[in-house]
Image: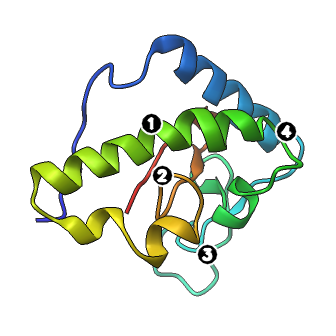
Amino acid sequence: KGRIAVVPNFLPQDLVSDLRSDAIDLYRSGQFSADALAAYGTETSAKFDPAKDRTVLKLNQWKRDDIGNAKLRHETFGNIMARLRTELSVALNRPKLDSGKSVSMYGVGSTEISYTRFGPVCICHYVTG
């Protein structure tokens, strides 16, 4: 039904720490940008407010090998997500979930993975589609 699933402790704490460090380093080096839905409210004069709005490491940045800890993102985390995608494909009887362009053109293990930073605190948010 397209709902979000939360699995506590799905990733080991040391991996979460490493991913957070990567996200923080990438944010500090200016790799994040405003999310398309960042401005809240319906006013036409709404301005981006870093205290309230979110910034993201977009997919084209996530996939780069020359910034941050690319090996961590692509190999370590990407392979975990690829295995999960394969397991879900079988368990849910959805063979197309694990095949085709969507799993090859966006990077290992994902159709969409990003880091998201909400307000003044960096929170790692991983989205797979």
Q: Compared with residue 123, is residue 85 higher up or lower down, i.e. above or below?
A: below
Q: Earlier in the sequence, mark 2 or mark 4?
A: 4
Q: CA distance from mark 1 to mark 3?
A: 39 Å
Q: Secondary structure at mark 4?
A: helix
Question: Looking at the image, which is closer to me, 123 or 82?
Answer: 82
Marks 1/2 in contact by CB < 8 Å: the verdict is yes
Give the left or right position of residue 40, taking residue 85 as reference: right
Amino acid marked by disc 3: Ala
Q: CA distance from mark 1 to mark 2?
A: 7 Å
Percent across and percent down for residue 104 are 54, 67
Which residue is identified by label 1?
80
Q: Compared with residue 27, is residue 128 higher up or lower down, i.e. above or below?
A: below
Amino acid marked by disc 1: Ile
Q: Residue 43: in sight, yes or no?
A: yes
Q: Compared with residue 38, is residue 4 higher up or lower down, i.e. above or below?
A: above
Q: CA distance from mark 2 to mark 4?
A: 26 Å
Q: State the residue lying farthest toward the top.
A: 14
Q: State the residue lying farthest toward the bottom.
A: 44
Q: Residues within 10 Å of mark 1 (few under 14, many from 20)?
A: some
Give the left or right position of residue 126, taking residue 36 as reference: left
Q: Secondary structure at mark 2?
A: loop
Q: Secondary structure at mark 3?
A: loop
Q: Earlier in the sequence, mark 3 or mark 2?
A: 3
Amino acid marked by disc 2: Gly
Residue 28 badge = 4
Give the left or right position of residue 33, taking residue 3 as reference: right
